[in-house]
Image: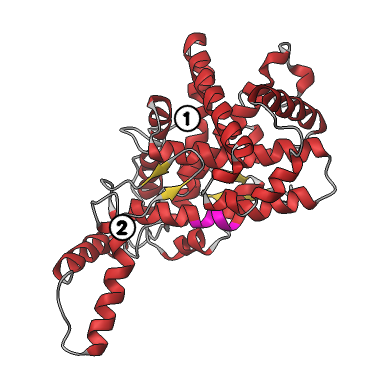
Amino acid sequence: MLEKKLKQITDNIHDTIYLSALESELISTPYFYRLHDIYQSSTVYMTFPSNRTKRYEHSVGTMEVASSILYSAVSNADNNIRNQLFKCLKQYYSDILSLSILQSGKQTAPYFVMCRDKIGSLFSGNNSSGSKLQKLVKDNIKEALIEGCFKDSALEHFQFYPMDIDQQKDSGNIENIFLYRCLLQAVRIVSLFHDVGHPPYSHIIEKVIEELYQKYSNVEGKNEWQNDRLENFRNCLSDYVTKDPEKAYVCQAIYSHTTRVDDALHERVGLSLLQSAINDVVPETIINLINSNKKKCCKIASSIYYIMVVEFAIAMLAEKNIVFKSLHKIVDGIVDSDRLDYIMRDSFNSGVDWGKIPY
């Protein structure tokens, strides 16, 4: 199970950024760690030598800004709007709960298949109907909250509903507390991985790669060695270049599947890398959790938590409905956490005295 150690990054823009246990594991995967070697601003450092920002720190900063945007949006929303948000989340949560537990044998999402048997063992004999399952999970979530199973310093600062049950006047908020925490973690993961698919020197090389693929898509080499190299090149890119949904790479979750065939190359590659990171981290985390000496309430609540975090994240990327499409705009919109971070970061690292945004 992920250890609840306080992990932090000292950032020149946002000061101290705390990482949740799940984020700490995800950024340690090779898919994300490679961003230490990817320049944020391509060859800008040749004109502004001090601007050698890497996409690693930009991605972490984007996550921090996205957390503030979500918290502020929910905090300042009209009660009716806020209620509509949680109504949508509850419906999605109910559907995922049914699909993951009651219909677990039908699921093909890679991360879930890897730990399906372990999760099934937690609910053995208790999943005869959707209503009974929801009550069972809700009761275990409440008990897990009382036990402090979801305490995580990185997330507490942006938690809209207090995690302390004693502070809750309305016991009906149990699901809202849980679902907001799932949503917060999902938004942070989406923002953290928004640039993970960038090649070296980012957009310049991305354009070159696309042009090379088009140029050599049907070209034969002069010898066997060249043919092998060209074939490998085409095989590596074909799933991320094609506009045919039937041939494109598909990111699979329990409830959402997405190809994002109209997106940029780095976004489609990033979708694959995000799924790889999830497949490497989440199943092992759930299995270790279930094998631990934790109370059963923590095992049940935390397992559902990890499932919902993944499902919310993929739903945002797939823009499953109008609510998740709107949430995706936090990271990929007109004024989003991505732009807000790199405007501040690139200005500061280039030594120019503008681009400061108080938030």
Q: Residues within 10 Å of mark 1 (few under 14, many from 20)?
A: some
Please state which amino acid type lies under the numbered disc 1. Answer: Ile
Residue at 58% x, 48% y is 112
Residue at 40% x, 34% y is 328
Residue at 36% x, 55% y is 249
Q: Which disc, if any, is residue 268?
A: none
Mark 1 vs mark 2: in front: 2
Query: In the shown orientation, is residue 300 left or right of residue 205?
Result: right
Highlighted magenta segment, given as a residue range: 276-280
Earlier residue among tags 1 and 2: 1
Element type where label 2 sits in the image: helix
**From mark 1 to mark 2, how far is it between C-alphas?**
31 Å
The quadrant in which residue 200 appears is bottom left
The quadrant in which residue 27 appears is bottom right
Magenta segment's dominant SS is helix
The front one of 281 and 61 is: 281
Q: Position of residue 104 (x, y in %)?
A: 60, 42
Q: Position of residue 191 (x, y in %)?
A: 46, 43
Q: Is residue 64 visible?
A: no
Please state which amino acid type lies under the numbered disc 2. Answer: Tyr
